[in-house]
């Protein structure tokens, strides 16, 4: 056993060395300017962009959260969530990627999402980017914490090591290579991590099905659990007073399956709406080398996501057949991927595969740290407090912010009983509702005003907080995922407030009408543009 542990640790150590080496390789270039540090100088190719966008998005919930959910209650919750995510991924790449890449260049070469919002609406006081940066800071602290939970659970399950100590260790590793290398190191490691995650999911799924005696035996066992494989019912584990599933004669006890109605299905599929407002994904669109390469990236990204989500859920379902009584709660069930890896694979290969979990959490948390740092440094410090700040000063502030987010994330992750899935769902809803509607309106509706943009961000954020904490606990129809009502309310606020406030200036309208024309900087607004507006040409949408 000691030899096995040594080989697992060796494989994981080699992985750590690899990602830190990448950070050092890109350190000199990353530190040449804030644009290089935060956006890679917009020189990232389609493969790196695609896998980086998806690996940074698919944090620990892909390898732990979703399998744990599927293991505990069956297909319905995890499956409809995954379907929503797959659709959302495709629509985000199709509707947003190319337009955002072009518009951020036109909007005074914006290098962060909050900066784009301010430049898009010519917000000279930078209120929009300041509010957006604060929202990012709040929810990314929570998001980062969920990634650190993943690392702590990994080492605790594999080696029995102290959860808190291992969680802090993993957090520091992520912090170091993000601090040193910036965006390019994050993208490069994301590419490697995306490949590793894909490999790990495929290997464990195939091994699990083989271990349980093939597809037919697996299906027969799972069909014996009421509602476990259904999309319109959900399995209901019978729990004791402590909240643990009751086991009897080496068999987990389930009650009658509960109905899984249309409203609940729509609620879980609403996860896909979050993509339109995810800064860690949108910033990849901004950094791609050329808008012409977006289509290739979209094909790569969607293929990766669909296969990876399918494998993650299948691992949770098959894991119930392999280890039917292993886990008594959903939180502990999130370790099923790790336990299967130990059970199925030789020690060194197990170390390689479980490094996929590190890959998932590290790629995501590094993105969260970097975006939080850039938001505070560029969108609060430079935009509000010191407009003539040098790039060096901005990067110092960014790194101070990284440290603060690191510490807050550790605090969030300190409870080892935290469910990765539900921690992620809260932050996902907050970011998706705050920025998703605004991103779509910014790219598609020329009449959107900065007052409407501000109202949409704030209403989306507040609705998520209020709905999650005060309305959802009422149950019934109110128990829907908070992202859905918050997204709708944010969109309504943007539309209504924009209609009630004066239309944007002719400069803003001109930029909107021509942002898809090319990647070069804008010329002056033509003197006769007012005449063009009067003649109705401004009604032609790009």
Image: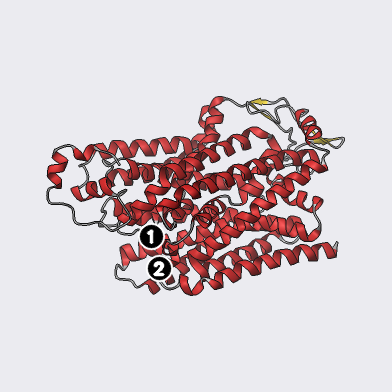
Q: Earlier in the sequence, mark 1 or mark 2?
A: 2
Callout 2: SS: helix
In space, the residues marked 1 and 2 are separated at their CA atoms by 9 Å
10 Å crowding of disc 1: few (<14), some (14-19), many (20+): many
Above or below, 495 relative to 40: above
Q: Are marks 1 and 2 in contact (CB under 8 Å)?
A: yes
Q: Which residue is mark 2?
A: 34
Q: Quadrant of the C terminus?
A: top left
Q: Residue at x 68, y 48 (%)?
A: 201
Q: Residue at x 56, y 30 (%)?
A: 265
Q: Residue at x 83, y 38 (%)?
A: 213
Examine the rendering and report whether any part of residue 127 can be seen.
no
10 Å crowding of disc 2: few (<14), some (14-19), many (20+): many
Q: Is residue 15 left or right of residue 537?
A: right
Q: Residue 379: which quarter of the image?
A: bottom left
Q: From the top left corner, tell me how far across and down residue 87 is, in percent.
A: 52, 38
Above or below, 447 relative to 132: above
Q: Which residue is mark 1?
A: 111
Q: Residue 210: which quarter of the image?
A: top right
Q: Residue at x 76, y 62 (%)?
A: 8
Above or below, 55 relative to 429: below
Q: From the top left corner, tell me how far across and down residue 120 is, in percent.
A: 30, 51
Q: From the top left corner, tell me how far across and down residue 303 is, in percent.
A: 57, 44
Q: Quadrant of the N terminus?
A: bottom right
Closer to the camera in the image, 203 or 508 = 203
Q: From the top left corner, tell me how far across and down residue 132 is, in percent.
A: 38, 53
């Amino acid at each position: 056993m000691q030899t096995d542990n040594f080989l697992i640790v060796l494989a994981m150590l080699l992985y750590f060395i690899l990602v830190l080496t990448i950070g050092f390789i890109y350190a000199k270039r990353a530190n040449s300017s804030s644009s290089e540090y935060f956006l890679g100088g917009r020189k990232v190719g389609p493969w790196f962009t695609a896998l980086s966008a998806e690996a940074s998005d698919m944090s620990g919930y892909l390898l732990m959260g979703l399998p744990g959910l599927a293991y505990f209650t069956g297909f319905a919750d995890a499956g409809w969530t995954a379907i929503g995510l797959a659709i959302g991924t495709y629509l985000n790449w199709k509707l947003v990627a190319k337009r955002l890449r072009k518009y951020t260049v036109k909007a005074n070469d914006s290098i962060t999402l909050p900066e784009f919002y301010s430049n898009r609406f010519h917000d000279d006081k930078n209120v929009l980017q300041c509010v957006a940066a604060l929202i990012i800071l709040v929810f990314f602290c929570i998001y980062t914490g969920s990634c650190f939970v993943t690392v702590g659970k990994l080492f605790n399950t594999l080696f029995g090591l102290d959860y808190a100590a291992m969680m802090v260790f993993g957090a520091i590793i992520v912090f170091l290579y993000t601090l040193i290398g910036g965006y390019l190191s994050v993208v490069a490691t994301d590419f490697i991590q995306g490949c590793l995650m894909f490999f790990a999911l495929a290997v464990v799924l195939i091994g699990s099905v083989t271990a349980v005696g093939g597809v037919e035996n697996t299906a027969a066992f799972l069909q014996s659990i009421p509602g476990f494989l259904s999309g319109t019912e959900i399995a209901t584990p019978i729990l004791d007073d402590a909240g643990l599933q009751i086991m009897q004669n080496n068999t987990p006890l389930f009650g009658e399956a509960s109905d899984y109605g249309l409203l609940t299905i729509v609620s879980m599929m609403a996860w896909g709406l979050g993509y339109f407002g995810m800064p860690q994904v949108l910033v990849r669109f901004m950094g791609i080398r050329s808008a012409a390469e977006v289509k290739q990236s979209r094909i790569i990204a969607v293929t990766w996501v669909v296969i990876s989500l399918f494998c993650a859920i299948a691992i949770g379902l098959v894991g119930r057949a392999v280890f039917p009584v292993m886990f008594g709660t959903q939180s502990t069930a999130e370790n099923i991927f790790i336990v299967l890896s130990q059970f199925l694979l030789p020690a060194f290969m197990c170390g390689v595969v479980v490094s996929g979990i590190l890959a998932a959490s590290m790629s995501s948390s590094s993105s969260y740290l970097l975006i939080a740092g850039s938001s505070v440094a560029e969108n609060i410090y430079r935009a509000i407090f010191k407009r003539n700040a040098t790039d060096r000063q901005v990067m110092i502030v960014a790194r101070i912010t990284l440290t603060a987010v690191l510490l807050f994330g550790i605090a969030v992750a300190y409870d080892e009983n935290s469910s990765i899935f539900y921690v992620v769902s809260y932050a996902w809803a907050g970011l998706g509702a705050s920025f998703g509607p605004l991103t779509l309106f910014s790219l598609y509706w020329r009449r959107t005003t900065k007052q409407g943009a501000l109202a949409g961000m704030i209403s989306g954020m507040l609705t998520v907080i209020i709905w999650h904490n005060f309305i959802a606990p009422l149950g019934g129809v109110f128990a829907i995922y908070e992202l859905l009502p918050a997204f709708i309310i944010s969109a309504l606020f943007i539309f209504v407030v924009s209609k009630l406030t004066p239309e944007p200036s002719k400069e803003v309208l001109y930029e909107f009408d021509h942002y898809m024309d090319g990647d070069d900087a804008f010329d002056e607004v033509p003197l006769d543009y007012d005449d063009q507006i009067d003649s109705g040409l401004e009604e032609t949408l790009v």
